[in-house]
């Protein structure tokens, strides 16, 4: 029975940790950082020039593969950028953190900022 529940949860895109459907959760708040993408946990190879991000390991592990290739709109300081989740951020410390490609981060703040507060939502 548990296996059936887990299978159903994965198929319909629910986070088992929060029991909230990915498409229904409103807004998340965390920290934004940047990295140099390569071959990511979703199985795609990306570059710094693409608008992509890695989801923090806490949430990636909770949401699992349904989050791969999902688009999120992230905002900080009155600016926003839409990115595709392509990787898992092992170095992200908090819940709901995103690690952006350099190009995506630069839309929100100068790279010299290093870490910024963000809000984001699935689109």
Image: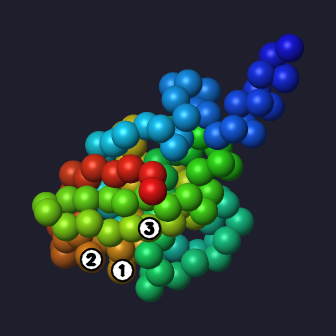
Q: Residue at x 52, y 29 (%)?
A: 20
Q: Residue furthest left?
A: 77
Q: How crowded is mark 3: few (under 14 residues within 10 Å), some or many (20 or more)?
A: many
Query: In the displayed structure, would residue 115 be above or below residue 57?
Result: below
Q: Which residue is disc 1 drawn over?
A: 103
Q: Quadrant of the N terminus?
A: top right
Q: Is residue 31 among the parts visible in the rendering?
A: no
Quarter holding the C terminus? bottom left
Q: Is residue 17 left or right of residue 75?
A: right
Q: Do the residues labelled 2 and 1 touch (CB within 8 Å)?
A: yes
Q: What element carries label 2?
A: helix
Label 2 crowd (10 A; few <14 / some 14-19 / many >=20): some
Separation (CA) of disc 2 from disc 1: 5 Å
The image position of residue 50, as x and y in percent, is: 47, 81
Give the vertical position of 98 relative to 13 (above or below).
below
Q: Residues within 10 Å of mark 1 (few under 14, many from 20)?
A: some
Quick check: marks 3 and 2 in contact, CB under 8 Å?
Answer: no
The residue lying at 36 percent from left, 74 percent from top is: 104
- Residue tagged 2: 106
Q: Which of marks 1 and 3 is in front?
A: 3
Q: Which mark is residue 83?
A: 3
Where is residue 52 drawn, in percent x and y?
47, 70
């Amino acid at each position: 029975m548990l296996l059936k529940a887990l299978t159903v949860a994965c198929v319909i895109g629910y986070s088992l940790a929060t029991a909230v459907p990915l498409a229904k959760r409103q807004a998340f708040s965390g920290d934004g950082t940047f990295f140099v993408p390569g071959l990511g946990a979703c199985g795609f190879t990306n570059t710094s020039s693409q608008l992509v991000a890695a989801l923090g390991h806490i949430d990636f592990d909770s949401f699992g593969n349904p989050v791969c290739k999902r688009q999120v709109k992230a905002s900080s300081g009155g600016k926003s950028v839409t990115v595709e989740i392509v990787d898992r951020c092992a170095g992200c410390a908090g819940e709901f953190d995103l690690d952006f490609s350099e190009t995506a981060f630069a839309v929100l703040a100068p790279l010299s900022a290093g870490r910024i507060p963000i809000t984001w939502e699935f689109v």
